[in-house]
Image (spheres, rainbow, N blue to C red):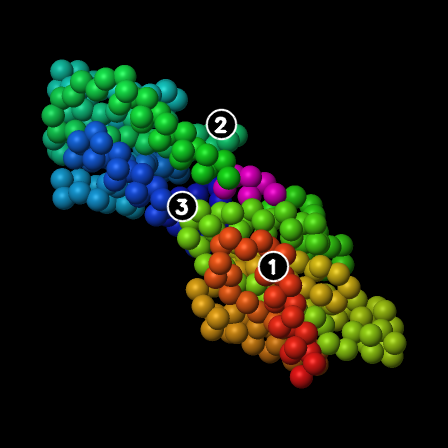
Amino acid sequence: MISPDHWVLEEKERLMPLDKWQKTVDVMARVFKAPAGFIVQSGPGGYQVVISSDQDSNPYEPGVLIPEETNIFCRKVVEQRRQLYVKDASKDPFWDSNPEVTDDGFHSYLGFPLFWPDGRPFGTICVMDFDSTDYGESYVDLLSELRDLIEADLGILHQYQVISDLAMTDELTELYNRRGFNSVASQYLALAKRSSLNLGLLYLDMDGLKQINDTQGHAAGDAALQQLAASIRQVVRENDVSARLSGDEFVMLVAAKDQQQLDTIAERISELLAQQQLRASIGSVLLDNPHKPLQFWLEKADRRMYRQKQR
């Protein structure tokens, strides 16, 4: 799950648009003619490099964790919650214990704090130089604009998380209901488009529910629906979205790189249901056109499910 209390590089589904951030930092370093540019996250235990400009002169790679007690430039930015411009660190004794200065040879730093929408610090975006610098106002404004772009991405991610946590669930199965699915899935699609995340959709229909209701009673029918929901929960991952759309119709929006992954998910659900002597028809589709709306994919997956049910 996306959280200010966890490292974004450890998120399993990588919902952060890291590829876009990488391009941003690379361009930033070129414009500033700086040997290093970074996006750094402040978190439990210190400061982690999330994005590092792709340059031979850059001594830090993504994933490097600097202990929180270390006297580094980014720590100062996060603690003071405002921009920091150090033109020449060698002229300020405060930085004599900064390993970025003493060990790596950096003399100049310009950085802005990054915040989650709720005001908690995310970290910093910054450029560093081995030489002293004298950036004009236009350079500072440029870095401020890049800061705004990164915070806009954090806002989208935060909104997705808030919506995901809303109580828009089906009472019987405790999955999302139709309204909840439409809200969360739309955010997920927008996020996937920005971060190049591949998605797939599965449309499921419980087979024989009317017969179960007629012969065993509605309590048995409800139990069958709950079992299908339980099977879905065993298969989906943390950031996948699943819902009960109506009486016996369910849907899953999942991260999937190809059709084979979707088929594997469908087979696993069928196996779990078979253990309870239940069965569901499942249609799946890979979302290979980011410009198509959610309803288009729902209808396409529904048609595939219906063809399977007819067979």
Residue 26: % across, % down: 25, 40
Front of the two marks 1 and 2: 1
Q: In the picture provided, is 156 more to the left or to the right than 215?
A: left
Q: In the picture provided, is 210 more to the left or to the right than 263?
A: right
| Mark 3 / mark 2, whichever is N-terminal | 3
Residue 161: % across, % down: 55, 43
As measured in the structure, the alpha-carbon distance from the residue carrying label 3 to the one carrying label 1 is: 25 Å
Specify the farthest residue to the bottom. Answer: 311
Residue 78: % across, % down: 36, 26
Q: Main secondary structure of the magenta part?
A: helix
- Depth check: 299 or 115 in front? 299
Q: Secondary structure at mark 2?
A: loop
Magenta residue span? 157-163
Rendered residue at 49%/58% (across/down): 289
Residue that carries the numbered disc 1 in the rendered image:
296
| Mark 3 / mark 1, whichever is N-terminal | 3
